[in-house]
Amino acid sequence: QWSQVEGWTASARMNGSPGLPDGVADPRPNEFRVTTVSSRQLLLTWTAPEYPAGLVSRYVVYRDDVSIDVTRQTKFNDLTVTPAANYQYRIATRFTDGTEYSTPPLAVHIEPVGGGVKFAPARVLGTVQLDGLNELSGLVASRQIAHAFWTHNDGPQDAIYAIDSEGRWIGGLQFLDAVMFDVEDIAIGPGPVANVDYIYVGDIGGNNDDRTTVQILRIAEPLLIDDHGATLATTSAYDMLTFEYPDTHGYNAESLLVDPQTGDLFILTKESQAAHIYRAPASQLTPGTVVTLELIGEIDFPRASGADISQTGGEILIRNEDLARLYVRNDGQSVFAALSRSYLDAPVVGRPDEPNGEGVTFGGRPGDYFTISEGSNPALHYFQRTSPYLAGDANHDGVFDSSDLVAVFAAGEYEDEAELNSLWAEGDWNGDGEFTSADLVLAFSMGAYEQSSTAAPAYPAMDVDACFAPHGTLF
């Protein structure tokens, strides 16, 4: 219902506009378009409606149904978008009497920096041959031991184990007097002492959805000696952190994250359709107290069985038995905000070769990751990221060489005055929307300039050293 404008007749058309006579021109903006200028800038353009002339007061720009600008112009630059995100835009004509007529929403997807992500097929680096390690659940790359991982069995376990990149035993650590009920994941991140990496062992499982309280063991990562023996070291030098869910509902959880940027701890529940995400701030991670977890939201991810966050905090992986998803996190963005955005599909081996697959971890190189599963002699799988792969490789031929430099400087956007106008092919390799010296520093710091005179194969040879060496970030 609406008020009839004096002197006008009501529209008899089923899809007529309020207060407009039949047969008049559409009062909504025309020729609405969205152009991607860079991974951090979109240009919206439209033309004025033909009717009613002279009565348009403003145009209102809506993003995801929230007004972000009111303008007299027929264009708008959105400089607040982020890579790997989805948005919906619409433009409304606002007339002098305050009424609005809006275009239909236009969906826009912004690719991640460098384009879509691809991975080489899984490579088996080795198998775990030790008796007793047949229910491996969590997996995390070591920060202290080169080419090594920490892992653990599922269930009431009081020990963690270090294996090398071929699945061979390095050593193990048993926690004296630790009473654990269902250990499901392991993480690494900051802790109470600055510049020290801590291992977090998550006793968070509950197959009957009956855990109302959970506990996480925290210990500074030890440096074990590679003796390929089977003797466990023992320690009492750990903290036991206790948490309770904010409601009386019990949960099963198998995914644990520790944010390297804030030190906050996150638990993702394992449910049939969605994962609830609970947070404990770093300031509350104190032994001897029971910390009430904060429910910060949920994401559409079925039966989450493992997760990891990259060493810089810029990427997050979540997996279940049959799939994984990679989430890109921008500077200053919260973990939940990153998980609430669009994701990039990432492969896992899945059933039957990786039964009940739960373990997943990043290596040192952005995007590459590793998985492991339960079962006898489980395989350590490596997934190498092939695109976008190398900062500096503007033409995506697998090599950073002079041809890339010629191309990006020929584009003429190096340190120009225009804001946020550069794409990957034009030199924006760090994702800030500009081609500046910072992009060149990143590209050359990776040490790959003219390492090969021919294009890399579709799936470059696996380099274990590169898997763990820090190479900066692609985002």
Image (cartoon, helix red, strand yellow):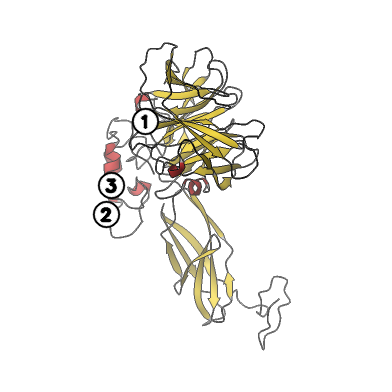
Q: Position of residue 92 (x, y in %)?
A: 54, 70
The one of 238 and 414 positioned closer to us in this rendering: 238
User: Decide: marks 2, 1 in contact (CB < 8 A)?
Assistant: no
Q: Quadrant of the C terminus?
A: top left
User: Decide: marks 1, 3 in contact (CB < 8 A)?
Assistant: no
Q: Amino acid at mark 3?
A: Ala
Q: Amino acid at mark 1?
A: Ala
Mark 2 or mark 3, which is nearer to you?
3
Q: Residue at x 50, y 32 (%)?
A: 216
Which of pointers 2 and 3 lies earlier in the amino acid sequence?
2
Q: Residue at x 36, y 41 (%)?
A: 395
Mark 1 or mark 3, which is nearer to you?
3
| Horizontal side of residue 181 vs 280, given as left or right | right
Q: Which residue carries the number 3 mark?
A: 438
Query: Is 131 drawn above or below residue 336 in the view shown?
Result: above
| Horizontal side of residue 65 vs 361, given as left or right | right
**Is disc 3 surrounded by few (<14), some (14 to 19) or many (20+) residues within 10 Å?**
few
Which of pointers 2 and 1 lies earlier in the amino acid sequence?
2
Q: Amino acid at mark 2?
A: Glu
The one of 183 and 474 positioned closer to us in this rendering: 183
Q: Position of residue 266 (x, y in %)?
A: 50, 40
Using the image, tell me which numbered label, if any, was put on residue 456: 1
User: Decide: marks 2, 3 in contact (CB < 8 A)?
Assistant: no
Mark 2 or mark 1, which is nearer to you?
2
Q: Quadrant of residue 27?
A: bottom right
Q: Which residue carries the number 2 mark?
A: 415
**Residue 116 can be seen, yes or no:** no
Measure how far apart labels 1 and 3 are at the Cα level. Answer: 25 Å
Element at label 1:
loop
Q: Position of residue 437 (x, y in %)?
A: 25, 48
Which of pointers 1 and 3 lies earlier in the amino acid sequence?
3
